[in-house]
Amino acid sequence: MATELASPRYEVPDTLEAIEFCYQQGWTDGLPVVPPTPERVAEFLALAGLDPGTVLGEVADRGRVITAEKAAINAVMAGCLPAYFPVVVAAIQALTDDAFCLHGSMASTGGAAPLLIVNGPIRQQIALNAGGNVFGPGRRANATIGRAIRLLLLNVCGAEPGVLDQSTLGHPGKYSYCIAEDEEATRWAPLHVERGLPREASAVTVMAAEAPHYVRNAFGQTPEEVLATVADVMAHGGYTQGAYLVVVAPEHRAVIERAGWSKADVRAYLVEHARRSAAALKRAGYLRGAVEPGDDQRFPPLVQESDLLIITAGGVGGTFSAVVPPWAGGRSSQPVTRAVAACAECEVDATADGKVLAPQEGGAR
């Protein structure tokens, strides 16, 4: 499906003026953007083999259509290289799947952000970080791919803070939230394989997510001891039912793998142990009613095995892992996985010709 709508063009005298022009139009996330010249946008579209009017997804609740051109414009603005664009395209297709509930998650007071988890050969082709500081700064691919999604939500989907985006607090992942799985470091099946794609495929999985919650355990010598801490963080993070991501870093993974545990074993343990008693839940207001005899021995489930995404990522030298809880909307938003089209490395022409394209629907606002 394609649309004939084209982006307006604006004449600006130089690059610095173009950056300031984008600020004036409200097209940024608060940080400077790369001016989206027609030539650079065309390079992105050509690499992906997409016509400008190709529709990548729709947000029916907002009456918004995301075209390939708008996606490319916002990817350029975010600082992406052309080789990153197929990941951005796949992420948009996943986000606009009805199962993800994009409108609800981006408009909610819960403050979730779309987290992108990338698997397959594309990780190494574009140098995505799956190791140390995996949730932090330092790697262009992670930072700019995640940022491209945020700019698209702002400029095309209208997710302006205080307007559509009603986040009470938000979190830093709302600037950029993109990681990769460290598939080579483990014998565990990669996430995209668990979700039905071939190992040789590249893929991106998206989930509506809170910020990462650290899991620190420097003393566990068995899988049960390490995972008891993971379960504790899950059960005491708000008791939101829905899809959780558990990121197992190398030192914790080594303990678990030495015992021969698979991802399925980890998942089964956490489903059984990531719980609080009915009495504790009533005292915290998660369950209504007075505490009754037997409530201290009754443990309502938090998650199902299908709710748990488990990956290996992070750096060595620290006894940390992470739990990423779901958006407060819980099971109304499901993780979605999409294959990423094959892509070869290419170079970006950094020159500009004094024109920029509007990154959002309807031109400047």
Image: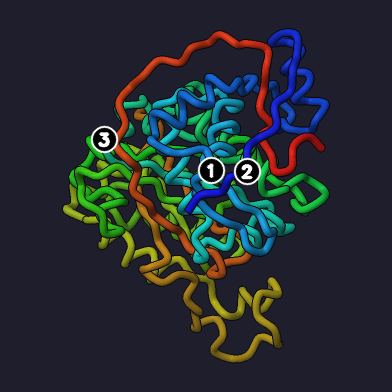
Residue 252 can be seen in this image: no
Q: Mark 2 points at which residue?
A: 5
Let me know if residue 109 appears in the view: yes
> Which percent across, then down, holds residue 295?
56, 85
- Report, in whole angstroms, how far the alpha carbon at label 3 lies from the one at label 1: 28 Å
Label number found at residue 115: none
Label 3 to label 2: alpha-carbon separation:
34 Å
Q: Which amino acid does label 3 sit on?
A: Pro
C-alpha gap between disc 2 and disc 1: 7 Å
Question: SS at mark 3?
Answer: loop
- Left or right, 109 with respect to 116, comes to right
Q: Which residue is drawn at 47% across and 44% down?
A: 116
- How crowded pointer 1 is (Cα within 10 Å; few <14, some 14-19, many 20+) is rated as some
Task: Please say if the residues under marks 2 and 1 sit with CB atoms less than 8 Å apart.
Answer: yes
79 relative position to 271: left or right: right
Residue denoted by label 1: 53
What color scheme is it?
rainbow
Viewer-proximal residue among 140 and 152: 152
Give the mark, 2 or 1, whose residue is nearer the N terminus: 2
286 above or below 3? below
On screen, residue 315 versus residue 255, left or right, reads right
**Label 3: few (<14), some or many (≥20) within 10 Å?**
some
Residue 225, x across and y down, in percent? 35, 54
Which of marks 2 and 3 precedes in the sequence?
2
Please tell me which residue lies in front, 145 or 268.
Answer: 145
Q: Is residue 162 left or right of residue 115?
A: right
Q: Mark 3 points at which residue?
A: 121
